């Protein structure tokens, strides 16, 4: 066994230092470290390619972006079926490795196509790449969390998921910094090869985590990781649409996506009126992104685990919807640049640092088939469906009904209130299922 896989002693310096930030057991440290590297490599891969994607999206014409998002939704739906087949047929380590190497091969094919394409061909390749990259991001991250909620229990998730999510934040920062610092000296072809190599690092981490998972397993219903999960091809979609618990998880993500889209368009509107120069707008957005990343990382490292452990899933899950109720109400009363952007900054940080790790805890009480199949459908198709509903609803309210920033914010406040009720129900139900799981296998309903 590799040194990194060996459980550290309770007196190890690394464990004592780590324990100052989060409540972690010595036996959990190796799995925590591999989880960190795993999500770090995935987000680094995506953020290496993201600037290339955005540039291609703009080059393809801004008026085409809505169709590119629609294409992304269709791609999400289609890709869930072969993924469900892999989950049904192969053991966990194998179907995850196949999935990541499929995306890695796609990256290399795009790199070769762009390298050999004419300027006219690049436009069309860029449009496909824009939609594909959006699919890639949600899918590879969803697969990561599928494995994490399969390895760690609900109790461990409350303590550790926020800290694990910090690896994603650092990966995003590192990937972006790498592209910014090398793009003037390196062709996109080589950057994309680097992104593909980072996926291979993720595959290596999957193998390490699979070996460590047996030591962390405490669920009586947990199958051996080397056995196929089984089930049916459409089992995940069926359960996501028939289980009351999963329907509410879907509703939680849908309402988050809708309100996020509302706020995104509101921010775009006020920034366009406040800054006439495109360079000034870009610099302003960059400063907001930097503020979000710094705030997110600080909360993930030092607060998320403590908040979840102290207040539980119900209260923690309701924090972002509650904040959104007040945030949209403030924007309705004071529709200014500072109120909109301040709300956006803290809301995004709150999602990455608190809401996202807490939402993943919801899946720890599901049967194994649903942790992979239903979760994949919810994380990808439902999320992008929320984007679509939010975008077209905002256009309907602002164009057809001619509602301004204040009126749209009032509508968003009401939606956030519904989201708050949904989050409170989910938190209570998750706690109930987690307690039942200690006694017997549970099928949420």
Image: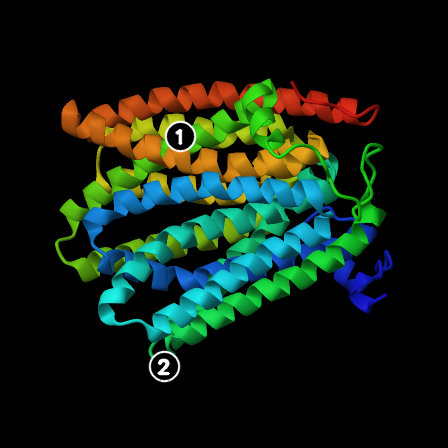
Q: In this picture, is 384 found above or below 95?
A: above
Is 408 situated left or right of 417 in this image?
left
Label 2: how many residues lie within 10 Å, few (<14), some (14-19) or many (20+)?
Answer: few
Quadrant showing the N terminus? bottom right
The residue lying at 68 percent from left, 34 percent from top is 369
Q: Closer to the observer: label 2 or label 1?
A: 2
The label shown at residue 185 is 2
The residue lying at 27 percent from left, 55 percent from top is 284
Image x and y of residue 21, in percent? 66, 51
The label shown at residue 177 is none
The answer for how far apart the CA atoms under marks 2 and 1 are is 43 Å
Image x and y of residue 270, in percent? 20, 42
Is 86 situated left or right of 333 in this image?
right
**Mark count:** 2
SS under mark 1: helix
SS under mark 2: loop
Image x and y of residue 2, in percent? 82, 67
Label 1: how many residues lie within 10 Å, few (<14), some (14-19) or many (20+)?
Answer: many
Q: In this picture, is 334 found above or below 414?
A: below
Q: Which residue is mark 1?
A: 324
Instruction: Locate residue 124: give its quadrant.
Output: bottom left
Q: In this picture, is 121 found above or below 97?
A: below
Color scheme of the displayed model: rainbow
Is 413 situated left or right of 37 in this image?
left
Residue 121 shows in this picture? yes
């Amino acid at each position: 066994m590799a040194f990194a896989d060996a459980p550290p002693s309770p007196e190890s310096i690394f464990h004592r230092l780590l324990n100052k930030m989060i409540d972690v057991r010595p036996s959990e440290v190796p799995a925590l470290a591999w989880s960190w590297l795993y999500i770090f490599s995935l987000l680094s891969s995506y953020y290496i390619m993201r600037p290339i994607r955005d540039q291609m999206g703009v080059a393809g014409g801004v008026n085409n972006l809505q169709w590119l998002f629609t294409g992304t939704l269709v791609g999400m739906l289609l890709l869930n079926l072969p993924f469900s087949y892999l989950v049904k047929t192969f053991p966990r380590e194998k179907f995850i490795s196949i999935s990541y190497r499929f995306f890695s091969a796609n990256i290399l094919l795009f790199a070769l196509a762009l390298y050999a394409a004419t300027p006219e061909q690049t436009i069309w390749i860029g449009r496909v790449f824009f939609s594909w990259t959006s699919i890639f991001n949600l899918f590879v991250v969803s697969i990561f969390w599928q494995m994490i909620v399969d390895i760690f229990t609900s109790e461990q998730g409350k303590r550790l998921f926020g800290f694990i999510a910090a690896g994603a934040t650092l990966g995003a920062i590192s990937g972006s910094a790498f592209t910014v610092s090398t793009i003037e000296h390196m062709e996109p072809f080589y950057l994309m090869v680097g992104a593909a190599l980072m996926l291979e690092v993720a595959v290596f981490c999957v193998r390490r985590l699979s070996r460590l998972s047996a030591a962390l397993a405490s669920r009586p219903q947990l199958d051996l990781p080397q056995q196929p999960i089984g089930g049916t091809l459409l089992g995940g979609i069926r359960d996501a649409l028939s289980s009351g618990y999963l329907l509410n998880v879907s509703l939680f993500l849908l309402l988050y996506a809708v309100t996020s889209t509302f706020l995104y368009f509101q921010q775009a509107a006020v920034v366009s009126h406040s800054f006439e120069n495109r360079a000034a707008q870009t610099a302003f957005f960059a400063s907001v992104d930097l503020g979000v990343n710094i705030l997110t990382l600080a909360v993930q490292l030092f607060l998320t685990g403590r908040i979840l452990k102290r207040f539980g899933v119900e209260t923690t899950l309701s924090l972002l919807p509650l904040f959104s109720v007040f945030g949209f109400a403030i924007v309705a009363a004071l529709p200014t640049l500072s109120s909109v952007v301040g709300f956006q900054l803290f809301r995004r940080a709150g999602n990455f640092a608190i809401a996202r790790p807490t939402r993943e805890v919801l899946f720890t009480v599901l049967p194994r088939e649903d942790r992979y199949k239903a979760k994949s459908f919810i994380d990808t198709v439902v999320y992008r469906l929320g984007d679509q509903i939010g975008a077209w609803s905002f256009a309907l309210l602002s164009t057809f009904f001619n509602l301004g920033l204040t009126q749209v914010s009032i509508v968003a406040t009401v939606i956030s209130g519904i989201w708050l009720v949904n989050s409170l129900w989910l938190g209570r139900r998750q706690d109930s299922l987690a307690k039942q799981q200690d006694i017997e296998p549970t099928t949420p309903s």
